[in-house]
Image: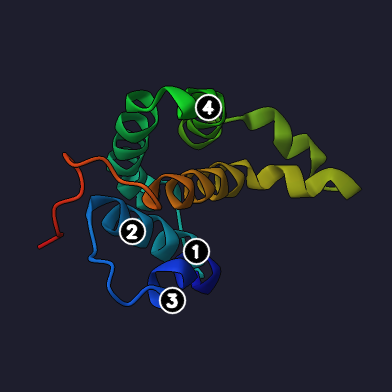
Amino acid sequence: MLIALWPGIRKGERKANVVDLALLGVCATLASPIAWEHHYGVALPAFGVALIMLAQDPLRRRALIWLTVAWALATNFLPNVNYLSDSVLNVLQSYLLFGGLILVALLVYVRNDPTPELATPAV
């Protein structure tokens, strides 16, 4: 979480906005020692914020592919990965975590240059 929030700590003059709030919610869920699937409900608004921010800037539209990958990982149940539990590839069972990490990376990517519509301070 500190890595994701470090640019905001470094720049003391920057005000918090909707992207920061979404980043906080997703980071808190990812860092939780017990995070079940329904706890990732906080990611839905974060996906919406990331979608709006990425779609508005033509230079960032390539990142929509990563947003789609994160959405696919975070919103689907993949029961076939359970067969990997007794192998070296059991890390693939954490696909929900990987989707959340991609979402955090995208939110950090878009928070450096917010659009005026989303740049209002969070309440």
Depth check, front residue: 122 or 102? 122
Q: What's the residue at 33%, 58% (across, down)?
A: 25
Q: Which mark is residue 10?
A: 3
**Label 1 SS:** helix
Per the image, label 2 sits on a secondary structure element best described as helix
Q: CA distance from mark 4 to mark 1?
A: 22 Å
- Reading the image, the residue beneath label 1 is 4
Q: Which residue is mark 4?
A: 72
- Tell me residue 92's x, y (percent): 73, 42
Sequence-first disc among 3 and 1: 1
The spot of residue 105 in percent (x, y) is 53, 49
Q: Nearer the viewer, residue 48 or 120?
A: 120
Please indicate, yes or no, whether residue 73 appears anywhere in the rendered image.
yes
**Hey, what amino acid is under mark 4?**
Ala
Q: Secondary structure at mark 3?
A: helix
At label 3, the amino acid type is Arg
Label 4 vs label 3: CA separation?
33 Å
* Residue at the disc numbered 2: 25
The amino acid pointed to by label 2 is: Gly
- Kindly report which numbered mark, 4 or 1, lies closer to the viewer in this rendering: 1
Neighbor class of circle 1 (other Cα within 10 Å; few <14, some 14-19, many 20+) is some
Disc 3 to disc 1, C-alpha distance? 12 Å
Residue 31, given in percent of the width and then of the height, sits at: 49, 67
Numbered disc 4: secondary structure: helix
Q: Residues at badges 4 and 1 in contact (C-beta under 8 Å)? A: no
